[in-house]
Image (cartoon, rainbow, N blue to C red):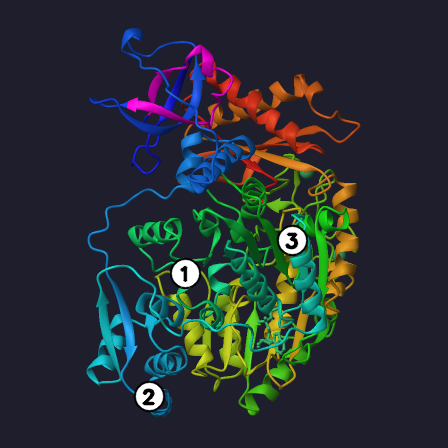
C-alpha cells in the first residue's frame, strides 16, 4: 500500500503530494489525515507530513519510493496543525470538494510579506487636548479628523490599520494630524500589537443576575469537563458582549485561548475598544484592511503564543491556537457564516467540530437565533439561556404595522403610508434622524395581489413562484411551471403583479416629499468601491444627513443615537422570496431594523408597511416575540420537511452548453431516484426533488441547473454526495461542473 503525503501545508501548491510506502507494521496507523514522519530530499531529512490518501498503485518506479518511518502518537506539541487537518477532513466529507480546497481554507497560504511593518499611532498630547481639538474639527464639519482624535483620546496608542478600517479614514487624514503635531506615526519593524493600556484586571461593570447565571453555568460546566454548547438568546443591548468578555477572561485564566467570530460589519470600533480595554495586546483582530501577508502574520503570532484572543469573521475560526478553550460566535444566525465557495462550509457547524477536536467549548449568541440553533437547543443539544433586560438602559422601540391594502383602498398609491409620512415630518422638525429600509435581497420577481395580498406559490413547495420574461411562473425547487396570471385567483383584482420598487425610486419620492431633507442612499450601486459603505455610515452618524435609505445593508451593526424612526417600506419583499428561509430572514431583518430605532434615551418608533399584516412573521416581529415566531416557523419547516427538521443538499450543475447541463442534472437526479433505497425512504422523508433551472438560471454565459436531496439524516446526504462524485469519476464529464451546498442559505 502507498500513501500520498503532503509535506508542507504552507507551500503554495497544496495539491503537490509525494508517494511513500506504508510498511506492514504501520498499516493500521496510517489513514487519511494521519501525521507521519518521512525521509525527504537528498539527505533524507526526517520531516513530518500528512497523509492525503491511500492507493495500491505506485505512480513512479517502485524502487524509488521510500518508506514512511514513523507515525508519531498525537501530542499537544503540534496540536493546532493536527486539529486543523482533522477539521479539514471533516469539511471535505461534510461539504464536498477536494481535500486541498478544504486545506486551503484552514491553512492560509503563506504569502511572502515584503517587509513586516506596522504603523502605530502614538498620541503626542493629553487626552483632554485631543478631545478639545476633536470638538473644534467637528464644529468645522471636519468629521474624519474629529472621529480619529476622539477615538485616540479614548484608546491611547493604537494600530493604524485597525483604526483606519474601523473608522473609515484614509492615511492622508492621519498624516495631516501628524503634521499638526497631535500624533506621531511610528513604523514598527516587527509585527506587534500596539501596547495601548495593558489590559485591566477584572471587569468595571459587574454582571447583572441574568448575565451572571450564564457565566457561572459556563464555569461550572467547564470545570466539570462538560462541553455542551451554549446558546445565548438576548435582545440587542442585553449585555451579551460583556458575558463573552468574562467567559474569555475565565478561559485565559485557565491557560487557554479564545476565538470570537463576529460579522465584520457588526464589529464596531466601540466593540474593539471594549476588548482592548480588557485584554490589551493579547487580543488581535482580523479585518478587511489586512493584506494576505498580514493575515498570515496574525496566524503566526497565534501559533507562537503571542496572543490569547482572536476576533474576526469566518476565517478567524482557523486561528492555530494550541490550547483552544472556547469559540464564541456572535450573531450566530448571520448568513455571512456560510462560505460562498467550495467547500461551502458553515462556520457554526465547523466550529462545533473544531471545538470537539480541541476539547473546547462553544458559545453561540444572537438576538434572533437561527431556527437551526433554537431547534437544537430545544432538543437538548445546546444549553439555552436568555437575556431579557437591558442593563445599560434603553427602551425597546414601539412598532406599528400598516396595511398597504387599506392605503390602496383609500387611494394612496405612493410608497409612504399616511402614518409614516406624518412621523417623518415630525422627526425632521425635531432634527432627529430617520432610516428607510427596502429589502431587495433574494427578491426575484414574485407575483402578488395589491388588493388582497395573495402571493402566487408553488403547489408543491410552498415557496413563491418567480415570474419570467417568457410569460411563465416557475418554482426553483421542483421546476413546476404555470402561465402567469393577470387576475388575482383569490379576489379577482387586476392589481396583481411584481413589486418593482427599488431604493433609487424611494430616494426620488422621498426627495419630492421632503425637499429640504438631506438624504443618503446605501445599496449595491452606491457601495461599489471599498470604503463606500463605511463612508456612508460615518456621514450619517455625523448627522450630515437626516434620512438614510437603504437595503438590508443599513440594518446591521452601528448605533445611531439620533435615529428615532425606522420605516420598512414593504416588508413583503423579503417575506416571499422563493426560499424556505424567507420568513426567518424577514423576521430577523425586521427585528434588527426595529433595534436601530431609539438606542438612546429618546424612544424610537418603527413603522412596518405590508400587504400581509396577518402573516405570523410580521405579527411576531412587530411584537418582537422570537418564541412566537419560532413556534410557528418550526411547524412550517416540519410540515414541508425543510431544515432543521430535515436536511437539504443542493446540487448545482453548471456548464456552457445548456443541453449538456440539463442532461447531466437529469442523469444525476435519476441516479439517486432509481436507487433511493440508501435514503431514509419516501415515507420517512428522504427524497430527490428536481432538477430545475436555478434561481439564476444563467450567469456569465454559464447555464445553471439544480436539484435537491432531502433526508432527515444528514449522513445520508453525505452518501448522496459520494455517489455523485463516484459516478462523475467514471467517464470524463469535463464540460459540466458540479458543486454541493449542504443545508443551503
Ligand atoms: P449586546 O452585546 O447584547 O448588544 P452589550 O454587551 O453591548 O449588549 O451591552 C449593551 C450596553 O449595556 C453596553 O453599553 C454595556 O456597557 C451595557 N452593559 C452591559 N452589561 C452591563 C451591566 N452588567 N451593567 C451595566 N451596564 C451594562
Ligand atoms: Zn387578490
Ligand atoms: Zn415547487
The CA span between labels 2 and 3 is 44 Å
Q: Which of marks 2 and 3 is in front?
A: 3
Q: Nearer the viewer, residue 263 or 685?
A: 263
Which of the 4 image quarters holds residue 15?
top left
The CA span between labels 1 and 2 is 26 Å
Crowd rating for badge 1 (residues with CA inside 10 Å; few <14, some 14–19, many 20+): many
Q: Write the start and end of the magenta stretch as one range.
A: 17-39
The CA span between labels 3 and 1 is 26 Å
Rendered location of residue 331, percent (x, y)? 58, 59
Q: Nearer the viewer, mark 3 or mark 1?
A: 3
Query: In terms of secondary structure, where does tag 2 sit?
Result: loop
Q: Is the residue marked 3 within 8 Å of ligand 1, measured from its CB?
A: no
Q: Residue 486, can we see it?
A: no
Query: In terms of secondary structure, where does tag 3 sit?
Result: helix
Circle nearer the N terminus (3, 1): 3
Question: On screen, 600 above or below 82?
Answer: below
| Residue at 46% in and 83% down | 543
Amino acid at each position: 500500500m502507498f500513501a500520498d503525503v503532503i509535506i508542507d501545508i504552507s507551500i503554495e501548491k497544496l495539491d503537490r503530494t509525494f508517494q511513500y510506502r506504508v510498511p506492514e507494521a504501520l498499516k493500521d496507523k496510517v489513514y487519511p489525515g494521519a501525521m507521519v514522519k518521512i525521509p525527504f530530499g537528498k539527505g533524507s531529512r526526517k520531516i513530518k507530513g500528512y497523509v492525503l490518501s491511500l492507493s495500491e498503485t505506485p505512480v513512479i518506479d517502485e524502487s524509488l519510493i521510500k518508506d514512511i518511518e514513523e507515525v508519531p502518537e498525537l501530542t499537544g506539541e503540534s496540536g493546532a496543525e493536527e486539529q486543523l487537518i482533522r477539521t479539514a477532513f471533516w469539511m471535505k466529507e461534510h461539504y464536498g470538494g477536494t481535500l486541498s480546497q478544504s486545506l486551503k481554507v484552514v491553512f492560509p497560504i503563506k504569502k511572502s510579506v515584503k517587509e513586516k511593518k506596522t504603523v502605530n499611532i502614538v498620541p503626542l498630547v493629553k487626552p483632554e487636548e485631543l478631545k478639545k481639538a476633536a470638538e473644534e474639527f467637528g464644529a468645522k464639519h471636519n468629521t474624519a479628523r474629529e472621529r480619529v482624535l476622539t477615538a485616540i483620546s479614548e484608546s491611547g496608542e493604537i494600530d493604524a490599520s485597525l483604526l483606519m478600517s474601523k473608522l473609515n479614514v484614509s492615511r492622508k487624514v492621519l498624516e495631516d494630524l501628524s503634521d499638526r503635531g497631535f500624533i506621531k506615526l511610528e513604523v514598527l519593524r516587527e509585527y506587534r500589537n500596539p501596547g495601548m493600556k495593558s489590559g485591566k484586571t477584572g471587569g468595571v461593570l459587574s454582571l447583572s443576575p441574568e448575565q451572571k447565571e450564564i457565566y457561572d453555568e459556563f464555569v461550572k460546566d467547564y470545570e466539570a469537563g462538560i462541553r455542551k454548547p451554549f446558546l445565548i438568546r438576548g435582545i440587542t443591548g442585553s449585555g451579551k458582549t460583556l458575558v463573552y468578555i468574562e467567559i474569555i477572561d475565565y478561559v485565559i485564566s485557565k491557560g487557554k485561548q479564545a476565538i470570537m467570530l463576529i460579522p465584520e460589519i457588526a464589529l464596531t470600533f466601540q466593540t474593539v475598544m471594549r476588548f482592548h480595554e480588557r485584554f490589551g495586546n493579547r487580543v488581535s483582530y482580523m479585518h478587511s484592511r489586512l493584506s494576505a501577508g498580514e493575515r498570515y502574520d496574525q496566524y503566526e503570532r497565534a501559533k507562537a503564543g503571542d496572543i490569547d484572543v482572536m476576533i474576526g469573521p469566518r476565517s478567524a475560526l482557523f486561528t492555530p491556537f494550541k490550547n483552544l478553550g472556547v469559540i464564541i460566535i456572535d450573531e450566530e444566525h448571520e448568513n455571512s457564516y456560510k462560505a460562498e465557495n467550495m467547500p461551502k462550509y458553515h462556520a457554526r457547524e465547523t466550529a462545533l467540530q473544531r471545538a470537539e477536536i480541541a476539547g473546547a467549548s462553544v458559545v453561540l449568541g444572537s438576538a434572533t437565533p437561527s431556527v437551526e440553533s433554537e431547534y437544537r437547543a430545544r432538543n437538548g443539544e445546546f444549553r439555552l439561556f436568555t437575556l431579557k433586560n437591558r442593563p445599560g438602559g434603553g427602551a425597546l422601540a414601539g412598532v406599528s404595522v400598516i396595511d398597504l391594502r387599506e392605503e390602496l383602498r383609500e387611494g394612496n398609491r405612493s410608497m409612504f403610508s399616511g402614518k409614516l409620512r406624518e412621523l417623518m415630518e415630525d422627526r425632521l422638525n425635531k432634527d432627529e434622524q430617520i432610516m428607510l429600509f427596502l429589502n431587495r435581497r433574494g427578491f426575484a420577481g414574485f407575483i402578488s395581489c395589491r388588493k388582497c395580498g395573495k402571493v402566487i406559490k408553488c403547489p408543491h413547495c410552498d415557496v413563491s413562484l418567480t415570474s419570467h420574461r417568457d410569460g411563465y411562473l416557475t418554482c426553483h425547487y421542483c421546476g413546476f411551471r404555470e402561465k402567469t396570471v393577470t387576475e388575482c385567483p383569490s379576489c379577482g383584482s387586476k392589481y396583481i403583479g411584481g413589486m418593482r420598487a427599488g431604493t433609487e425610486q424611494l430616494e426620488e419620492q422621498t426627495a419630492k416629499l421632503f425637499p429640504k431633507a438631506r438624504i443618503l442612499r446605501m445599496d449595491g450601486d452606491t457601495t461599489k468601491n471599498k470604503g463606500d459603505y463605511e463612508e456612508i455610515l460615518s456621514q450619517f452618524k455625523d448627522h450630515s444627513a437626516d434620512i438614510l435609505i437603504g437595503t438590508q445593508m443599513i440594518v446591521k451593526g452601528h448605533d445611531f443615537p439620533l435615529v428615532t424612526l425606522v420605516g420598512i417600506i414593504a416588508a413583503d419583499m423579503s417575506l416571499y422570496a422563493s426560499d424556505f428561509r424567507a420568513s426567518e430572514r424577514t423576521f430577523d431583518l425586521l427585528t434588527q431594523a426595529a433595534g436601530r430605532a431609539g438606542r438612546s434615551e429618546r424612544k424610537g418608533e418603527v413603522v412596518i408597511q405590508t400587504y400581509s399584516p396577518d402573516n405570523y412573521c410580521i405579527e411576531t416581529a412587530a411584537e418582537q416575540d422570537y418564541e412566537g415566531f419560532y413556534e410557528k416557523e418550526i411547524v412550517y419547516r416540519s410540515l414541508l420537511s425543510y431544515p432543521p427538521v430535515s436536511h437539504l443538499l443542493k446540487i448545482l450543475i453548471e456548464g456552457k452548453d445548456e443541453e449538456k447541463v440539463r442532461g447531466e442534472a437529469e442523469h444525476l437526479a435519476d441516479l439517486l431516484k432509481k436507487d433511493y433505497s440508501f435514503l431514509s425512504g419516501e415515507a420517512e422523508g428522504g427524497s430527490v426533488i428536481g432538477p430545475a433551472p436555478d434561481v439564476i438560471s444563467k450567469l456569465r454565459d454559464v447555464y445553471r441547473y439544480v436539484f435537491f436531496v432531502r433526508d432527515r439524516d444528514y449522513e445520508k446526504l453525505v452518501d448522496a454526495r459520494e455517489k455523485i462524485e463516484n459516478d462523475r469519476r467514471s467517464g470524463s464529464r469535463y464540460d459540466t461542473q458540479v458543486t454541493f451546498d449542504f443545508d443551503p442559505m
